[in-house]
Each structure stands twice: as structure tokens, then as C-alpha cells.
Image (cartoon, grey):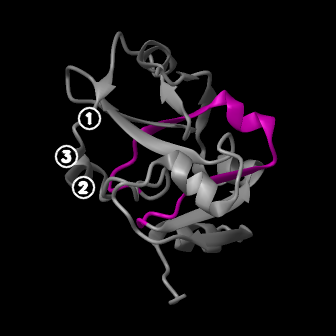
Amino acid sequence: MSEVKTNPMRTLDKADVQYRVHTYKEDPKLSGADVANILGEDPDRVFKTLVTVTKDKKYNVFVVPVEKELDLKKAAASVGEKSVSMMPSAQLLSITGYVHGGCSPFCMKRPFTTVIDSSVLNGDVIYVSAGKVGYQLELSVDDFLRVGGFKVAEISREASG
């Protein structure tokens, strides 16, 4: 594996946080559940980063387990909004600095309110994107929440069909 250092890795290094990097072969057809399977990890511990937008163009970031869906009503309530909708993935790079499949909750272009699903508290470790497709970070939940300064709320629901 080549020595790739992403901004999220540099942020964790600077905060003196222990983490592991896991890599997998890039494939645009891979789902988050596929990535969890490739890594041999519990999909409840592997999280995806989603970005929403309000009617007045305020962006919020939500992090939920890969096999769950973002509950838009709960997500909106968690950030004090009436409603939020998913941001079109075509806007992801220009707004966050990340591409679809490589979006990390750390080190976005601008600071956004970021909310992590409360299920994160059900385990000791979390896996999130390292900011590049094919790279996942494994770190303790405590370090993840401390370094990110993220809010925790119940924002997910079971995936439909």
C-alpha cells in the first residue's frame, strides 16, 4: 500500500489519536455494506457521511451506519430545522471537498454542523471514510467524538426495502 495521507489522517495525527487505515479496491458499484463486508467488520460500526441542504441553502452533515437510512425528520430536528433534503451528489465536491464514496466527516472545505447517529455509542470503535475512496479510518468512538466535536442524536432508521 502506498503511503497516502489524507487531511482527516493529518488531523488525527495532530490530535495524537491512534487510528488504523483500511484499504479496499475502488469500485463505484460498492455500497457501504459491501465495504463493511470487505473489511470483515460489523456494518453497525461502519458509518457513511451524508450531506443535506435546507431550503435556504444551509448545509448539515449526518453520519449513520452503512445499512441504515437517514431519517430526514429526525435529522432536521437535530439541527433545529423544519426540513432538510439530501444534497445532490453533483454538488458534493464543490461544497465539501470530497467525492461520493470518499466523504469524511473530518476536514470538509467549510465547517458544518455534524451529527452522528446515537448508535455510535453502542460500541468502542467506528469506521469512517478517510477522505478518499478506498480508504477507511478505524478509531475509538471517544477519540472520534472528541476530535470532531460532533453532536450525537438519534437520526437513523432501518433501510426500506
Q: Which mark is residue 93?
A: 2
**Residue extent of the magenta highlight:** 108-133
Residue in the picture at 49% in, 28% down? 69
Q: Is 41 on the left or on the right of 35, as rendered?
A: right
User: Badge 3: few (under 14), some or many (20 or more) residues near its Cα, within 10 Å?
Assistant: some
Under circle 3, the secondary element is: helix
Where residue 87 appears, as percent x and y from the top left, is 26, 35
Kindly identify which residue carries mark 1.
87
Residue in the picture at 44% in, 59% down? 107
Q: Nearer the viewer, residue 131 or 23?
A: 23
Residue in the picture at 62% in, 67% down? 12
Alpha carbon distance from label 2 to label 3: 6 Å
Q: Is 136 on the left or on the right of 19, as rendered?
A: left
Task: Please state which amino acid type lies under the numbered disc 2.
Answer: Leu
> Do tag 3 and tag 1 residues touch (Cβ < 8 Å)?
yes
> Do tag 2 and tag 3 residues touch (Cβ < 8 Å)?
yes
Task: Please state which amino acid type lies under the numbered disc 3.
Answer: Gln
Task: Please state which amino acid type lies under the numbered disc 1.
Answer: Met
Q: Does residue 17 appear in the picture of this structure?
A: yes
Q: Which mark is residue 91?
A: 3
Alpha carbon distance from label 3 to label 1: 7 Å
Alpha carbon distance from label 2 to label 1: 11 Å
Where residue 118 appears, as percent x and y from the top left, is 67, 29
Under circle 1, the secondary element is: loop
